Image: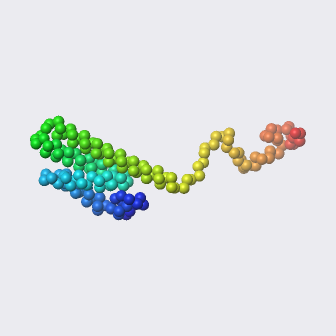
């Protein structure tokens, strides 16, 4: 089902099957020992699009992690080929750092895109009437309180004071 964003993976009608397919191809290419991990590097833009269109935070981080793993495995291969052997600190440190940077970059840009989309949607939505809380002093008095009309005093009293049985006061 396409979302109304107008762009990206979800807008193209990419649903459950294509998401599972992308995850499966990425994991199989990362697990291959014959150089299939190069394909995983080509899938990083699709991971970014999927992270950008994801509905939940955990899903965004999962897509970002797949992109970071793809970058890290390819950096490991480059270090291994350039050095010609296992160079101990570079073989693990450089791929780890580039993987963390790639994961952070995909996650932060997808969060930023989601935030921008939410702000635009909130600006386009009609604003509801806002009721400000009122203090007891500024709150308007009800016209009827406890079953009687408070605009007129009770008979035999003026503003709630008794007059000694003489009836309502007539002096002003």
Residue 126, above or below 88: below
Quadrant for residue 54, please give it. bottom left
Task: Point out the residue furthest to the top here.
Answer: 89
Nearest the eye: 87 or 60: 87
Q: Position of residue 157 (x, y in %)?
A: 82, 41
Q: Position of residue 59 (x, y in %)?
A: 33, 51
Q: Quadrant of the C terminus?
A: top right
Residue 9, above or below 97: below
Nearest the eye: 59 or 109: 109
Picture residue at 77% right of the left edge, 47% below the top: 151
Scheme of image coloration: rainbow
Task: Point out the residue furthest to the left here.
Answer: 85
Picture residue at 76% right of the left edge, 49% below the top: 149
Picture residue at 76% right of the left edge, 46% below the top: 150
Nearest the eye: 42 or 57: 42
| Residue 48 visible, this angle | yes
Q: How many marks?
A: 0
Picture residue at 70% right of the left edge, 47% below the top: 142
Q: Quadrant of the N terminus?
A: bottom left
| Residue 146 visible, this angle | no
Please state if 46 lies on the left or on the right of 135 as rendered. left
Q: Position of residue 40 (x, y in %)?
A: 22, 53
Q: Position of residue 140 (x, y in %)?
A: 69, 45
């Amino acid at each position: 089902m396409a979302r109304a964003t107008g762009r990206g993976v979800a807008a193209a009608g990419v649903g459950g099957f294509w998401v599972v397919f992308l995850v499966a191809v990425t994991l199989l290419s990362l697990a291959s020992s014959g150089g299939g991990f190069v394909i995983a590097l080509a899938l990083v833009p699709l991971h970014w699009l999927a992270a950008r269109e994801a509905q939940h935070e955990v899903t965004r981080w999962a897509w970002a992690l797949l992109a970071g793993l793809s970058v890290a495995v390819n950096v490991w291969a480059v270090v291994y080929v350039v050095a010609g052997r296992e160079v101990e600190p570079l073989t693990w440190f450089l791929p780890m750092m580039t993987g963390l940077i790639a994961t952070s970059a995909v996650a932060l840009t997808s969060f930023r895109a989601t935030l921008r989309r939410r702000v635009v949607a909130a600006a386009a939505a009609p604003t509801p009437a806002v009721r400000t809380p009122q203090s007891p002093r500024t709150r308007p008095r009800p016209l009827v309180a406890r079953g009687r009309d408070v605009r007129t005093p009770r008979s035999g009293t003026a503003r709630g004071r008794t007059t000694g049985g003489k009836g309502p006061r007539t002096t002003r």
